[in-house]
Image: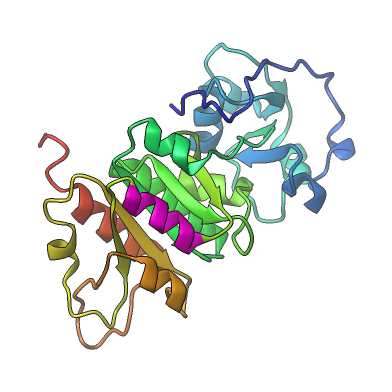
Amino acid sequence: MRRNHPKRRQNTDVATRPDRPETQRFSRREEEGGPVWLWGTHAVMAALANPARRFHTLLATENAAQKLPAGRLSPQIVTAKEIDQRLPPGAVHQGIALRADPLEEAVLEDVIAAGATRIAVLDQVSDPHNLGAIFRSAAAFGFTGLVLQTRNAPTITGVVAKSAAGAIESVTEIRAVNIARALEELGEAGFHTVGLAGESARPLDQAVKGAAKVAIVLGAEGPGLRPAVAKACAELARIPIAAEMESLNVSNAAAIAFYEASRGSFPAT
């Protein structure tokens, strides 16, 4: 689970009076700095287990409530339709939703000081589903921090959390005003910063081999890395793919890159 961080709030539970579903419908304002709705079994269970979370409201259908562990917040038993009314259209909530404060962002230098050895850096990746999938792959392959630009990058909404399947609770979100400067800071801390670029002749497995500390840098869907960000990387590398395909989806590329960077780090089972 994500540990309390020097730059994060210390949380206490909030007991809230049950609200009628129609009084707390989803609104864009809830996704811009205030409490957010998280939904789906994995996302909600991980949030409930995170001591750094501050909760407001937990909704569950009768069936879903039976899967919830006894803990810091008792659920309001509602119908699936009532949960639908709280969430954005099309949200697949699996009968459970949690309204909670966002986790506070971390400072890169603190994450480095805490001993991180695998960090992902995203240069203006904008699709929330891709972002959530990247969080999930980062958690799977031992990447403990994910750097996003302060601007031009999505906030961590319920859509991101659902796609991440709980990984936003264990991979630290780091915001940086200037991605190129963040890469310089990582380099100064001993990280080998590798940017993914299809035009590079350097295979990714060779670029990350033997590096004790690695930062994988991925660019936006379509345009890829911006020139200043590419220049700030220690080297650029490519994932070899069939000539018939021009590129990979950024979340797929991230999963492959994270695997290569962590190969040998986990015991075979």
How is colour applied across the structure in the image?
A: rainbow
Q: Which residue is drawn at 17% across and 63% down?
A: 207
Q: Residue at x 19, y 55 (%)?
A: 260
The front one of 179 and 61 is: 179
Residue 130 visible within the image: no
Please provide percent x and percent y for residue 3: 47, 24
Magenta-tinted stretch: 179-188
Residue 181 visible within the image: yes
Please provide percent x and percent y for residue 173: 51, 43
Q: In which quarter of the image is residue 235?
A: bottom left
Q: Residue at x 55, y 29 (%)?
A: 47
Q: Is residue 199 above or below residue 156?
A: below
Q: In this view, does 267 lie to the left or right of 245?
A: left
The front one of 259 and 232 is: 232
Q: In this view, does 28 lie to the left or right of 264?
A: right
Q: In this view, does 188 lie above or below 237?
A: above
Please provide percent x and percent y for residue 5: 52, 27
Q: In which quarter of the image is residue 227?
A: bottom left
Please provide percent x and percent y for residue 228: 45, 74
Q: Is residue 181 magenta?
A: yes
In the rendered image, the quadrant that contains the C terminus is top left
In the rendered image, the quadrant that contains the N terminus is top left
Main SS of the magenta part reads helix
Q: Is residue 95 left or right of residue 165?
A: right
The front one of 123 and 21 is: 123
Q: Which residue is drawn at 66% across and 16% down?
A: 73
Q: Residue furthest bottom?
A: 244
Q: How many labels does the image show?
A: 0
Q: Which residue lies furthest to the front in this view?
A: 188
Q: Is residue 254 magenta?
A: no
